[in-house]
Image (cartoon, rainbow, N blue to C red):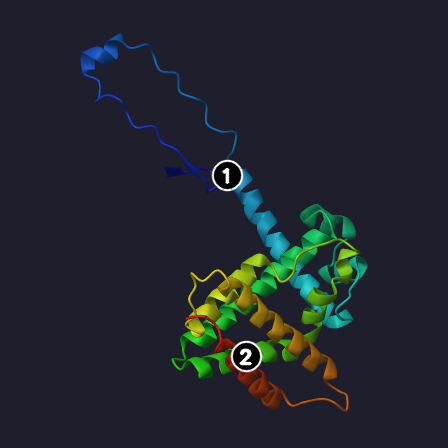
Amino acid sequence: YAIGKKGCLTPQIAPTHEFATHAEMRQMPPVKIAAPADRDGRDARWDSHRAQRREDLVDATLRAIRRHGGSPSMDEIAEIAGTSKTVLYRYFDDQAGLYSAVAQRIDTTILERTLQTVNDIGDPPQRLAAMVSDYLDLLESDPEIYRFLEKKTLLDGRSVEYPTRELMSAISDVLSALFASNRDQPTTPMLMAGIISLMRTSADQWLQSRGTEHAVPRDEFARDLTAVLWSGASGIPR
């Protein structure tokens, strides 16, 4: 197999004979060389420009969320980006496309931070504690981004999965390794999903309690949440 233009594997046909001799080649009909694909440097530059422009617009969306809260309008996003809604739709088709691009950026940030955190710690319980603390720190430092992803008001009723399957799978792998669980056990992915759901739901309640009489210091909540997660993980098949 070989990698095609779009990164897909394409079958290669093995030759059925050895190289032809010079005499045999003279008897062969002339070979017609196919014209190169209609793509030049300008196309590549445009692809690069489009990708960069999308990243810039995601940056602008994040700034709009931090300024206007977790439910910014497309007009507010366009204003922060210094452009129009027409341009936003040109690069993202619709609100769902923009939401998904922002979600992908945040997913990448969460996963990178998680891996950096757990890779530097050997003791599993301490690794889990650091992972929980880092996640809470991310929510506490950027709560409106979290609300944007959870409320999904930009979608205007459209259905978009979040957390994405890619993020859930990646975090599940991290937790499976941390708990030394049997990844071949059919229930393991389900149990990891349950642990992630417990962590997210508890963190959401903690975040909503901030500024109220029921507020709990982050370190105290992180300690108790880690204890619950580690205790529950003790029943996972290994």
Query: Which residue type carries mark 2?
Result: Leu
Q: Which residue bears the numbered disc 2?
A: 229
Residue 141, image x, y percentages: 64, 79
Marks 1 and 2 sit apart, C-alpha to C-alpha, by 53 Å
Q: Residue at x 60, y 76 (%)?
A: 138
Q: Residue at x 45, y 70 (%)?
A: 237
Query: Which residue type carries mark 1?
Result: Gly
For marks 1 and 2, the one nearer the N-term is 1
Q: Nearer the viewer, residue 137 or 47?
A: 137
Q: Residue at x 78, y 66 (%)?
A: 71
Q: Nearer the viewer, residue 32 or 154?
A: 154
Side (left or right) of 170 relative to 27: right
Q: Residue at x 48, y 71 (%)?
A: 175
What SS does tag 2 mark? helix
Q: Nearer the viewer, residue 189 or 235?
A: 235
Q: Which residue bears the numbered disc 1?
A: 41
Q: Residue furthest top?
A: 27
Side (left or right) of 48 relative to 155: left
Residue 128, image x, y percentages: 49, 79
Task: Say whether residue 142 is visible.
Answer: no
